[in-house]
Amino acid sequence: MIVNLQNTGWEIIYHRAHALLAAQIAGHWDLSKKTYRLYETIAAIAHHDNLEKEWEDDQLTEAGAPLDFTLERETALEQLSQHVKESLYQGRWVALLISMHMCFLNQGRQDEDPDVAQFVQAQYRQQAQWRDDLGVSKEEAEAAYTYMRWCDRLSLILCQRQVPMGGRKLEITNGPDGQQYHIVQSESGDLEVAPWPFSCDQFTVTVDACYLSQLKFESNPALTAALQEAPRKTLTWTLNRPSDA
């Protein structure tokens, strides 16, 4: 889960909600741009964080605070493999992108853990088989995954409240077209993305957040129970095409 400290306590955004926000962003992409199997890709974006189950395992820091995903322990390889297998129920294209995402998140661990290296190499072989079955090139698959990761990154920027104040630009990441994109907050408080990659000049996206006034919890069941009873709020962002675009 995404945990933001506020003056009144904690703001919690579930990872599955963040993934749905990423899918909302993806749904506004300019359809004239070449994006392979767009709607299946959006489905993969919406479900890529289904592995995250905030009601299971330990979700507390050693101090008893809600555990932000950046501090979470490494997920077992068996769970990663199962996540890819379950995504196959939606189709090989969705499974391919989910598998690519699992490899991206774990590629840095290959040199230090032979089991991770074996997992990643097995996923690479499976990806190659799925690409052959679907008749798509590695370049087409990588472009679609780059698009998926771009939407995921922008969603995280919003959920983690990373957009800087004072009109300063923040890099999102390179898009599937190789361009570098930035986000900035305008004087009106709305957000602008440049260059503008979307099909309309303005749109709004939302995500649900939970709010906890209690700062410390004795156990994970106590946190889970508090989250189930916590008040919720809809967070809203409006994205605009820059005036000079």
Image (tube, rainbow, N blue to C red):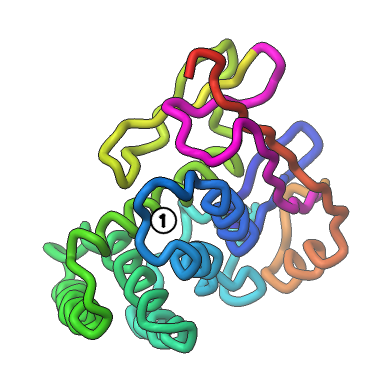
Residue at 72% in and 46% down: 11
Q: Quadrant of residue 170?
A: top left
Question: At label 1, which amino acid type do we have?
Answer: Met
Image position of 50 with respect to 26: above or below: below
The N terminus - image quarter: bottom right
**Residue 54 location, x and y as percent?**
62, 68
Relative height, residue 60 to residue 131 (above, below): above
Locate residue 90, reporting x and y percent: 48, 83
Q: Nearer the viewer, residue 126 or 119?
A: 126
Q: Secondary structure at mark 1?
A: helix
Q: Is residue 197 left or right of residue 232?
A: left
Query: How many discs appear?
Result: 1
Residue depicted at 34% across the width and 64% down the height:
101
Which residue appears at 16% of the width and 65% of the height?
110
**Residue at 73% across / 64% down in the picture?**
223
What residue is pinned by disc 1? 148
Q: Position of residue 105 (x, y in %)?
A: 32, 60
* Residue 141, x across and y down, in percent: 27, 64
Quarter residue 188 falls in? top right
Mark 1 surroundings: few (<14), some (14-19) or many (≥20) residues within 10 A: many
Query: Would residue 94 be visible to someone looking at this image?
Result: yes
Task: Tell whether position 189 is magenta.
Answer: yes
Q: Residue furthest front?
A: 32
Residue range in magenta is 187-212
Name the residue nearer the viewer: 103 or 90. 90
Q: Is residue 115 visible?
A: no
Q: Is residue 92 left or right of residue 68?
A: left
Residue 206 belongs to the span the image colors magenta: yes
Q: With respect to residue 207, does 58 lie above or below?
A: below
